[in-house]
Amino acid sequence: MAAADYLKSVRDRDWEELESGTLRIAMISLGWWTREQAIPAVADSEFCETTVLVSRSREKATAAAEEIPTVEAALTDEEFADGEATDAYDAAYVCTPNALHLPYAEAAAEHGKAVLCEKPVESTRERAERLVEATADVPLMVAYRMQTDPLVRRTRELIAAGAVGDPVSVHGSMSQQMQETVSGDPDQWRLDPELVGYGASVMDLGIYPLNTARFVLDADPVSVTAQMRSVDEAFRDVPDQYAAFTIRFDDGTQAACTASQHAAYTGHFRVVGTDGELVLEPSFLGQPEGTLTLRSDGRRFELDDGRRDVMRDEMTEEFDYFADRVLRDAPIGPDGDHALVDMRALEAIYEAAETGTTVSL
Amino acid sequence: MAAADYLKSVRDRDWEELESGTLRIAMISLGWWTREQAIPAVADSEFCETTVLVSRSREKATAAAEEIPTVEAALTDEEFADGEATDAYDAAYVCTPNALHLPYAEAAAEHGKAVLCEKPVESTRERAERLVEATADVPLMVAYRMQTDPLVRRTRELIAAGAVGDPVSVHGSMSQQMQETVSGDPDQWRLDPELVGYGASVMDLGIYPLNTARFVLDADPVSVTAQMRSVDEAFRDVPDQYAAFTIRFDDGTQAACTASQHAAYTGHFRVVGTDGELVLEPSFLGQPEGTLTLRSDGRRFELDDGRRDVMRDEMTEEFDYFADRVLRDAPIGPDGDHALVDMRALEAIYEAAETGTTVSL
């Protein structure tokens, strides 16, 4: 019965302590990710509700509000900054271009609201530090949805339990055809250094294997190497249409990663240890039939947790985890300090590629 | 019927032109790989025969010869160098520690014999250049068994046919617990810089993803980065108990690789392109049920060519390919110049780790 019990509990929320309650969310802003992933995920959630919509465009906010019965207020950016309708929400989900996270998080903190901020937390290390400082008095969580993904949590547990021996190497890849996948905006902000920060692929995609490795290893990066290239005209202002990089962690594990905003929609994650290996595939991109495979001593264990709408499920888990922590006034796992470690690593990866050196953190 | 035809022809020898003939092989020397892999593979082969055994120890050579009916002569190293029994063999298979490839290849070439030399071709770039020079007048092939592995050849064909679009990224990992896997020799030469060359893991294992990437992409390395560490006492004289490295190729593809002589017995190989990805897993280590997976546009194609004793099969293919080329006096694919490109890349990978810089080739 052990196997059946394990399979049955694979998706249990090992983090959940809250019994009831509702965290009312202001959605900032209304790009495709918010509309197609975050708002539906909150609708599925147990402890969250979308009550406020914030957009540059009043028309867009009002039109979207009409489709969501729980929404109490549709605000422009200025109205949000000015503190309108602060009675209608408890927390802000900041899902703007990277370099706009700071002003929205700052405004939310001024209104005394908790902040769930998309990753990377800002466009540069300096701006990220300002954001963390500005939100010091409110709960801040950075939206690493992998950290509440059940299969990633099982991976972390298996590693901690010694299932692969001592971790030695990590492989992580993530790529998409950004211009096709990320719909809508022809003036794609991920290609604009002013909005995206250091670059297009490692900032947005490479951060997944980086942060997932940190989470499952419980380790932090200490040095990095990188090679990057941009070829197509659309990528002329960023260095990393294609990127390959290595990361050494403080437990000695070394990762080899690739990321590209101009390749097939695919991702995988692998941890090799002295006694076995763990593979999550596909991973990161919410593709169905994600499988966790453990190989050790010629034996193989495969786990499919049955999710088919993986991205939405991950977002639901993330929002409920956030609510669980905020409503109980409990410490939040991926907080601002955690995110700053990634920002330093991202800065170092771009510096390594630009200078052709190994960069220590 | 196309699928059935494809499956049926998956293991066809697309390289074979020879109709009959026998290449008589002198086996140098009689370590575990020669005894457990090479000699059985030659016994399975169509065009090769083991006729001479060469060992430091006359007793070892004589005892081994008694078990192999095709053997005509058992020689000591000195007797081989002095040109004894040259009528009994046409080619020498050099499977010694890396830094001994040169004297044996040199002697074989002096006797006018073809040379099949294990990889890496020598311990350093300089010695490899001397070996290639010394064998200039005889056929020289370097024993990259991946290049005659049917699934690797199908991978190369699929890439050339555009199955993944333009290749963008490669991932390759290979590791083993060397002290357990490579049996017998307590004074393990792979840990001795005088015999192994630059290091233990990238020289012996990292060369697999490096060379396989070159072969399937039809591209050569142009720059590398690397991080390495050695922790255990046994690895004190080599820098790479664990290694992670990146390689940029001249077609723009970038690879992220890991290699370790002190981790689980496992390997994988992946090519991500603009339109899809190809994964060979497990790979490199001769594990059964090796599968080639092609993913593109949400579709998946999986190919298992049915081999269960993969390593021996790869070696049989390699020996027959070698015989096909030598007996027809035809050019050989992985020749000395091809192997020198790897030696320059290996030297650069170790230099990159030591100096903390990106090294251009």
Image: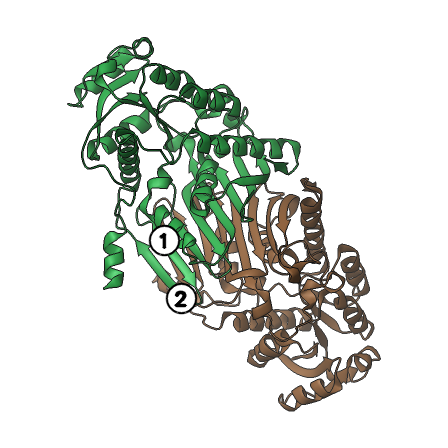
Chain colours: A green, B brown
The answer to whether residue B331 is seen in the rendering is no
Q: Which residue is located at x 61 percent, y 37 percent?
A: A360
Give the residue type at disc 2.
Arg
- Image quadrant holding the C terminus of chain A, namely top right
The chain containing the residue under callout 1 comes to A
Q: Residue at x 75, y 65 (%)?
A: B99
B57 shown above or below B342: below
**Residue occupying image coordinates x 63% and y 71%:** B324
Mark 1 is on which residue type?
Leu
**Position in image of residue B54 (x %, y %):** 73, 80
- Residue A60 shows in the view: yes
Look at the numbered disc 1 and give the secondary structure of its residue.
Answer: strand
Farthest residue to the right: give it: B82
Callout 2 secondary element? strand
Query: Label 1: which residue?
Result: A292
Which label is found at residue A299? 2
